[in-house]
Image (tube, grey):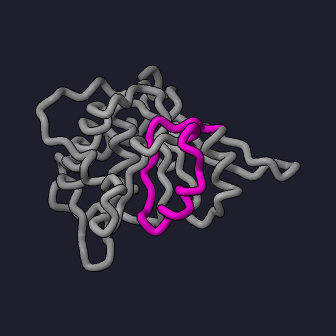
Amino acid sequence: MAPIEALHQRARTSPDGVAFINGNDRWKYAWLAAQAERLARGLIGRGIRKSDRIVLHMPNRPEFVVSVYACFHIGAVVVPLNHKLKAVELKPLLEQSWPALYVGDTNLRDLLNEIDCSILPQERRFFVGETREDEALQPWASLLNDSATPLPVAAALHSPAVLFATSGTPGVTKFTMHTQATLAALFGLPFICGS
């Protein structure tokens, strides 16, 4: 069972079960699954397709979880980057990963201003957190879509799902790829070979 399938199964069997807690907010499985679907539709509306890379650059927060599951829905590849990176560290990672879309915390917007638009165009940058004070920032919430557009069939379990940046031996950062199958094994989800 792929992680996205596990989420939907939990949303059906325990819709009011608590998926995670953020401060005083308790996010239920049904709500999390619905938000992931809304974001998946929004990503498709922005032209994101299977195998496109989506950089997630933020501390632990609900939007990160929703974004990961939305990517799993459409077969996009999640590229989580440490929010503590400096521009000089972030730039080569963006150059190597060539993201189709960036979702980051508004507290990191100044850092992103140092990244050339040829690497990451402005219209492909979205931010979570307070964006009202800066009209140039595209809010993450603008990606959510309530249309009834059908979502694609979930990506194959052996398709790339996540690229993790790791430090290489000579100090050069490299990426390690995980599939939904390897993630399922890591998290102890039931796994059916041949899917």
Residue at 57% in and 54% down: 81
Q: Is residue 160 magenta?
A: no
Tell me: 178 left or right of 64. Answer: right
Image spot of residue 8 (x, y percent): 25, 43
Tell me: 25 left or right of 59. Answer: left
Q: Is residue 65 above or below residue 131?
A: above
Q: Is residue 144 visible?
A: yes
Residue at 37% in and 31% down: 48
Residue at 53% in and 51% down: 80
Tell me: 4 left or right of 54. Answer: left
Furthest toward the bottom, the residue is: 24
Residue 82 in which image quadrant: bottom right
Image spot of residue 139 (x, y percent): 31, 55
Q: Quadrant of the C terminus?
A: top left
Tell me: 75 left or right of 163. Answer: left
Residue at 35% in and 31% down: 74
Residue 76 in which image quadrant: top left
Furthest toward the front, the residue is: 135
Q: Is residue 178 visible?
A: no
Which contiguous range is marked in magenta?
A: 96-119
Q: Quadrant of the N terminus?
A: top left
For the residue pair 35 and 16, the one nearer the viewer reads as 35
Furthest toward the right, the residue is: 170
Image spot of residue 94 (x, y percent): 60, 44
For the residue pair 16 and 41, the one nearer the viewer reads as 41
Residue 163 in which image quadrant: top right
